[in-house]
Amino acid sequence: MMRQDFRWAVRVYYEDTDAGGIVYYANYLKFFERARTEWLRAAGISQQQMHAEHQAIFVVKSTALDYHAPARLDDELIVTVVVERLGRASVQFTQQAWCGALLLASCNIKVGCVDALSLRPSAIPAVILHLIAA
């Protein structure tokens, strides 16, 4: 499994900030979610195709998020994605948000695969597991 960071750029817009012009804390989860989606795309995984062909979807099981420094309106952030652990039915990620050399937020996120109809845990389809591990 590759331990290389996937990097995705995002600009901070007015809608991302609070009254003080600082990124609202919950929006880091949106940035992390978007970066994971782009990481999946870069790995050749379409979540819509996974749902249609395998009746499987990814859901967030847990998050642990630490804030280190504020981001502000118009900042360009780099959000990283690293697979820490790949299980039969789950993926553990470490993600970080950076503004230049300044670490803004770091997060451990566990994503589980579930059956799209029952929402019960399900093995990650073999073809998807292979693409994640590549």
Image: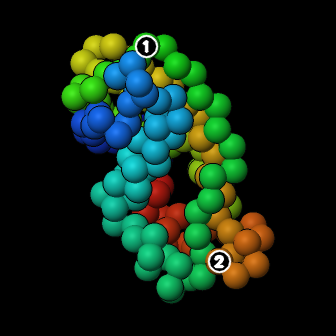
The answer to whether residue 13 is visible is yes
Q: At 35% from the left edge and 40% from the top edge, which residue is drawn?
A: 15
Q: At 53% from the left edge and 79% from the top edge, which residue is drawn?
A: 51
Horizontally, residue 122 falls left or right of residue 124, namely right
The answer to whether residue 134 is visible is no
In the rendered image of this protein, does residue 134 appear above or below residue 93?
below
Which quadrant of the structure image shows residue 96?
top left
In the rendered image of this protein, does residue 111 appear above or below residue 122?
above
Q: How many marks?
A: 2
Which quadrant of the structure image shows residue 46?
bottom left
Badge number at residue 93: none
Q: Which residue is mark 2?
A: 116
Q: At 70% from the left edge and 82% from the top edge, which residue is drawn?
A: 117
Return the x and y of residue 101 as percentages of the image width and height.
28, 14
- Label 2 CA crowd tier, 10 Å (few <14, some 14–19, many 20+): some
Q: Secondary structure at mark 1?
A: loop
Circle 2 or circle 1, nearest the eye: 1
Q: What is the CA distance from the residue labelled 2 to the residue labelled 1?
A: 37 Å
Q: Secondary structure at mark 2?
A: loop
Amino acid at dot 1: Ala
Q: At 49% from the left edge and 76% from the top edge, which residue is drawn?
A: 50
Return the x and y of residue 17 as percentages of the image width and height.
38, 30
In the rendered image of this protein, does residue 125 appear above or below residue 23?
below
Q: Which residue is mark 1?
A: 69
In the rendered image of this protein, does residue 97 appear above or below residue 13?
above
